[in-house]
Amino acid sequence: MKEFQRIAIANRGEVAVRIIRACQELGIQTVLLHSEPDSQSLAHRLSDHQVCIGSAPPNESYLNIQNNIRGAQAGGAQAVHPGFGFLSENAEFALACREANLTFIGPDAGAIKLFGDKIEAKKIAEEMKIKTVPGYKGDNQDINFLIEQCEKMGYPVLVKATAGGGGRGLKVIQSKADVREKIESAKREANSSFGSDKVFLEKYLDRAKHIEVQVFGDALGKIHILCERECTVQRRHQKIIEEAPSASLTEKERQILCELARKIAEKGAYKNAGTIEFLFQDGDFYFIEMNTRLQVEHAVTELILNLDLVKAQILTAQGMPLNWSRTELSARGHAIECRIYAEDSYSQGMPSTGRLGDMELPNGPGRRFEFGFETGDTITHYYDPMIGKIIVWDENRPQCIKKAIEVLSQTVIFGVKTNIPFLKAILAHPDFVSTTMTTQFIGKYFPNGLEQKSLTNDQRKFAAFAYDHCTLAHSNDQIVLPNPWRQDWRV
Amino acid sequence: MKTVVFQIGAKKTTGKVQKIKDTLWVHLNGETFTFGPERAEKKRSSPSTKITGIILAPMPGKITKVDCNVGNSVGVGNVLISMEAMKMEYSLKADKTGKIKFVGCKLGDQVALGQKLVEIE
C-alpha cells in the first residue's frame, strides 16, 4: 500500500476537472499537465500546481509521452491519472510512468497492451469462443490489399484505427466508389490522432445496438461487474447520448452479457476501471473492444449504483480496498448522459469555436453537470468539441427522458452554439422513446442535423425589445419591458 | 446575463439575454438563439446550401489532402479537399460540375474560417 500526496493529471477539460475534484475529496494535491492555450482553463484554475508541457497541437503536448513524464516529475507527483482519450490507453506511456517511478492510475501496461490492441483483443475473445464481427485484422496495410478485403467481406465495411478509441480514424465504407478515399482518410486521422496509421476492417452490422459493461478490478484482485450501459445513439461513431441500464435487454440477456464481460476481465486479471464493448443484434452479442480506462459515460453508472469510479481508481492504484458491498452494487432507477458539444445543431453539426458567454446550469436532485469550461473561457479548434456533459437520474426511463429534456431546456449557454436542440430532438424521437433505435439512428433520422429554422414572431419581438433595453440596465439584473403592443402602436 | 420580463397583455414571458459584441444571445422558452438586427437577417436570407462553385473553409483547420489541380474536370460530389479540425476530418466536395479554376491551399496549410480554398468554373 502506498499513499499519494500529489497526482499529475495528463488531460484537459471536463475530465481534468472531474479528477481534480475527486483528488480534493481524498485530500490529494493535483498537478495539471497542460498545453499552452490551456493555461486559461477551469482545470488550470482549480488545480494546486500546473506544468506547461508544450504547445497547442496534441502531438506536441498531451500526446507527448516524455513531456508528460517530465512534467509529472517536475511537479513532484507520485502518480499520473491519464483521464480518457490522449495517452489513457497507451501502453508505452504506462511503461514510461513505471520506469519513472510514477504510478499509472489504470490497469498495468501488460493489460493495456493485451486489450488495447483491438486486433489482439478480438483474438483473445475468439479463443474464448466469444463472437466477434468478421473482418481483416492483419499486418498487411497495403491499400490495394485492404480494398480487396473489403470486396471479399461485402459492403458496408468499417475501417478503424487499430490504436484508437472513440470515433477517430473510423469510417463506414458504403460501396466500391468510396473505398479508397475512406481508407486513406481513416489512415490520416489515425496517424494524426494516435501516431500510428495502422487500420483494420470489419463487416458493418447494420441494425445493432451498442451495449457495454463497466468492469472494475479492485486492489485485492476481485472483478466487479458494474452493470451495462447502452450507447446506441452515435454520430460518425461518436457517442452522443448514453444511458444505464440498457432498456433493450431481457433479464436473461443481461446475465449472459455480464458473464461474457466477467470472462474477458478475469482472463486478463484486470485491475482498475475498464469497459467491454459489444454490439447486440438479433439476440447475439458481438465483442468489439475493451477500453482499458475510464470512459466519458462513466457517470451514468455512478448514478444508478451510487458510487465514485474516479475515487475508486485512485484508491485501487494506492493498493487500498474498496469495501463495495453487494447491496451497494445493485442498480436503482435510470440515468441518461447527454454530451454537450460546441457545434451548430442547425448547420450539420459544424464546430462552433469562440469565447463562452454566461452560463446557467439548473441544479436539482438527480441532475449532474460536468463542465470543463466557465464563462470567459475559449473553445479552440485544437481539441475535441465536447465542453461538458449533463447527466440526469430518475426512478425509471420514461421519467428520466422527460427530465433530461426539461434540464436541457433550462440550461443556458451563451457565446458558442451547442448541440442542445439536437439532443432534445433525439430524446423526443419515437424510436428513442420506445428503445427501438439502432446505431443507424442518427444517419436514418438526422443525416444533416436539424433543419434551419427562422425566428418566430414572438422570438423576434422579444429579442428586438431586449436588444435595445439590455444595455440600459444597471445594477438590477431584471428588466421589465413595457407592453409591446402599445409601443408598436405608438410608432 | 440579464433576465428580461416581457408582458404582452396578460401574458408574461421571461427570458435571459446577454449582449456579446453586436449579437444578442437570447434564451426564451427553452430555446437559445442569437439576434443582431442586420446580421441575423442577412444570414437567414442566404442559406449555405447555395451552389456557387466556390469552396470555402467551413471552419479553421489544417489541410490534410488536396485532391484537385487547376484545370482538372470535376463532377458534383467529387472530394476536392480534406481538412482536419477539432480532431475530426471533413471532406469538402464539389457542388457543381466544371473545371478547377483556382486552388488556394496546399497540404499542411492552416486555413482560416471562410478562406477560399477552391473555385470551380
Image (cartoon, rainbow, N blue to C red):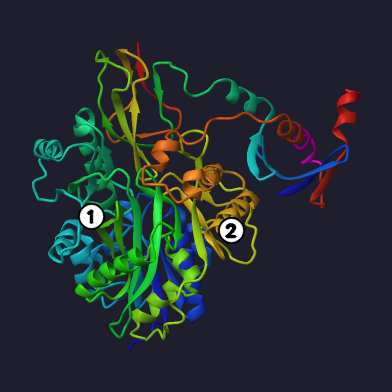
Q: Give the percent coordinates (x, y) of residue A337.
A: 49, 57
Judged from the image, the secondary structure of the residue bearing numbered disc 2 is helix
Q: Say if A16 sits above or below A377 in the image.
A: below
State which chain disc 2 sits on: A
Magenta stretch, main secondary structure, is: helix
Q: Residue at x 76, y 48 (%)?
A: B3
Q: Give the percent coordinates (x, y) of residue A490.
A: 91, 24
Q: Give the percent coordinates (x, y) of residue B73.
A: 25, 13
Q: Identify the mark nearer the N-term, 2 or 1.
A: 1
Residue underneath mark 1:
A163
Q: Residues within 10 Å of mark 1 (few under 14, many from 20)?
A: many
Question: In this view, which residue lies farthest toward the bottom?
Answer: A1
Label annotation for residue A399? 2
Q: Say if A309 sits above or below A5 in the image.
A: above
Q: Quadrant of the C terminus of chain A?
A: top right
Amino acid type of the residue tagged 1 in the rendering:
Ala
Instruction: Between residue A65 and residue A323, name the one nearer to us.
Output: A323
For residue B102, say whether it is visible.
Answer: yes
Query: Quadrant location of residue A123?
Result: bottom left
A16 displayed left or right of B72: right
- Look at the image and give the residue range highlighted in magenta: A464-472
